[in-house]
Amino acid sequence: MVEETRSFDQQTLTGGFNDTKKRLLRYILLHRGVCSHSSLLNALRALEQDEVADEVGGEVNERLDLILKDINVNLSKVGYSVLRCYDRYGDRCYAYIDVGQTAETKLATTFNADELEYVKWCIASFMKSGGIVHDVDDHGSRVRDAVDDILERASSSSQRRLDKVVSYTEGSLHLCDYVALGASRAEELLVKLCKLKWFYRTAGGRVGLDTRGVLELNEYLSREFETPQCCACVSTTLSGVICSCRRSAWHVACFQHTVVHLTQECAECGQSLLNAFYLD
Ligand SMILES: [Zn+2]
Ligand SMILES: [Zn+2]
């Protein structure tokens, strides 16, 4: 996790990294391990004003790809990687991930045994909530807005809205009702997990697994629970769209590609994706 990696960062980055690579990686770490594509591009542009003699040519996007590839060659020696991925809303981002340890080991390096049990209990609560299908409420949501935009563009009718939602989240009040730790310690841990970008908390006080948490815990999640798997990129997704048959799901970005370029029907059950559920 980011807190642990800072110390290794200071030692390791002195060798094998030029200044641009070192600063870019530090920039991602300063964003607590998850940084948007546009922010990282801007950071690279800003850095390059100081480093005219950049050894890698080409457009800035291509340069960023090449630099990250190089960074990953160095990071792979110590079991870390910068992954190109999408955030909960379908925007491109980069996540700094520990690929060398199991989820349990990762968690155990940051939390003591009681806290670790609590984190697992929270995750089990999120997964349990995901088993229920709700009617869509009137509260706004960036994920639903992003899905609505895609549906509007994909279908001929003007306003497409899905009626149902499946949510792998739990209310923070419920998550603080954990006798073994007590409410204030539980709340402190929730704040810490959100800072680490493993969890997120909505304005309405619901808590769920954030982009980094899903990526870091992907193997644990699919081993312990029946998490929705994105049928486009074959990885766990807890934000986006899920078919009413529950056997097909998509990240926001993957849903866009699917309905615009590939198909508007679920490959598993043949139903129209325009009648699927939000995953939010
Ligand atoms: Zn996907
Ligand atoms: Zn289906």
Image: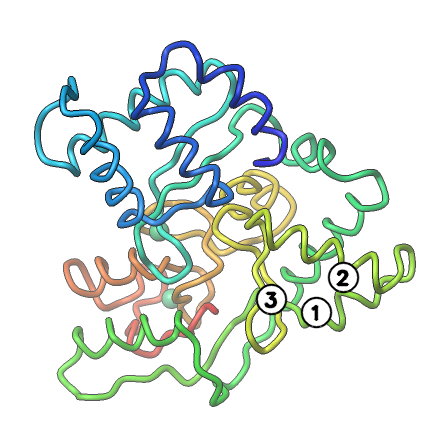
Q: CA distance from mark 1 to mark 2?
A: 8 Å
- Foreground: 40 or 51? 51
The quadrant of the rendering that contains the N terminus is top right
Q: CA distance from mark 3 to mark 1?
A: 9 Å
The residue tagged with tag 3: helix, strand or loop? Answer: strand
The structure residue drawn at horizontal position 74% and vertical position 53%, both measured from the top left corner, is: 189
* Disc number for residue 169: 3
Q: Earlier in the sequence, mark 1 or mark 2?
A: 1
Instruction: Kindly indicate the quadrant of the structure image that contains residue 132.
Output: bottom right
Instruction: Kindly indicate the quadrant of the structure image that contains residue 199.
Output: bottom right
Q: CA distance from mark 3 to mark 2?
A: 16 Å
Reading the image, the residue beneath label 1 is: 172
The structure residue drawn at horizontal position 39% and vertical position 67%, both measured from the top left corner, is: 241
Q: Residue furthest front?
A: 50
Q: Is mark 3 within 8 Å of ligand 1?
A: no
* Disc number for residue 113: none
Q: Which is more foreground, mark 1 or mark 2?
A: 2
Q: Which is more foreground, mark 3 or mark 1?
A: 1
Reading the image, the residue beneath label 2 is: 187
Could you tell me residue 252's position as x and y percent? 34, 61
The residue tagged with tag 2: helix, strand or loop? Answer: helix
Instruction: Kindly indicate the quadrant of the structure image that contains residue 53.
Output: top left
Label 2 crowd (10 A; few <14 / some 14-19 / many >=20): some
Label 1 crowd (10 A; few <14 / some 14-19 / many >=20): some
